[in-house]
Amino acid sequence: MSQPHIADLLSQQLTRLGQLLALLEQETDALVNREVEQIETLLKRKLAMLDEVALADGNLARHPDLAQLSADPELQQQTTQAKALLAQCKQRNLHNQQQAELASASLARLQQVLLSTTRHSKSMTYNDSGQTHVGSRLGKSIKA
């Protein structure tokens, strides 16, 4: 079985990285809109795409004509494009991670407020910074 041409492998990798970036942008939208089912679907697709990218990267690294990537100006340009796309993917993925962490923290805070409200609904107040406080402080400091 003959090896595919390294230019073809690089071109396919560029396509994969472009698809991964588009998928990450869809993930951002789903995170912002809190579309849980869409996030789960995109996560599965992202993991499959990352496996494909890693496999293709390994095939490129083991290709007998690997030296052409640095010798041929056109392949150098495509390699630079691939590295730039990969950097964009990493940045977008980091952004999505931060968005997911913010959403998780927000939901945890909401859950805490709702649970404390249902347990102690008559004793919930707010402090000077707007945080909820549950306890029996209500009216304790009033001397009128």
Image (tube, rainbow, N blue to C red):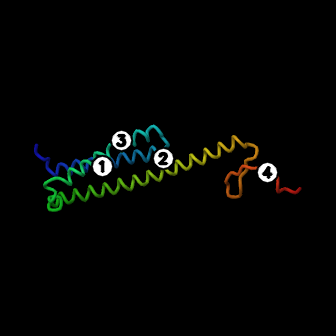
> How far apart in space, not on screen, are marks 1 and 2 (Cα)?
21 Å
Give the label, 2 or 4, closer to the camera.
4
The percent coordinates of residue 126 (x first, y second) are 71, 52
- Does 40 sit above or below residue 130? above
Labels 1 & 4 near each other (Cβ < 8 A): no
Residue drawn at 16 percent across, 61 percent down: 73
Residue drawn at 23 percent across, 51 percent down: 58
Q: Which residue is mark 1?
A: 18
The residue under label 4 is which amino acid type? Answer: Leu
**Residue that sits furthest to the right in the current view:** 144
The percent coordinates of residue 18 (x first, y second) are 30, 49
Give the label, 3 or 1, closer to the camera.
3
Labels 2 & 4 near each other (Cβ < 8 A): no
The percent coordinates of residue 76 (x first, y second) are 20, 60
> How far apart in space, not on screen, are marks 3 and 2 (Cα)?
18 Å
Q: Which residue is mark 4?
A: 138
Q: Which residue is mark 2?
A: 32
- Does dot 4 land on a helix, a strand or a loop? loop
Dot 2 crowding, Cα within 10 Å, few <14, some 14–19, many 20+:
few
The residue under label 2 is which amino acid type? Answer: Val
Quarter of the image for the C terminus: give it: bottom right
The residue under label 3 is which amino acid type? Answer: Arg
The residue under label 1 is which amino acid type? Answer: Gly
Q: Earlier in the sequence, mark 3 or mark 2?
A: 2
Quarter of the image for the N terminus: give it: top left
> How far apart in space, not on screen, are marks 4 and 3 (Cα)?
52 Å
Judge from the rendering whether residue 135 lies leftward or rightward of residue 85; answer left or right.
Answer: right
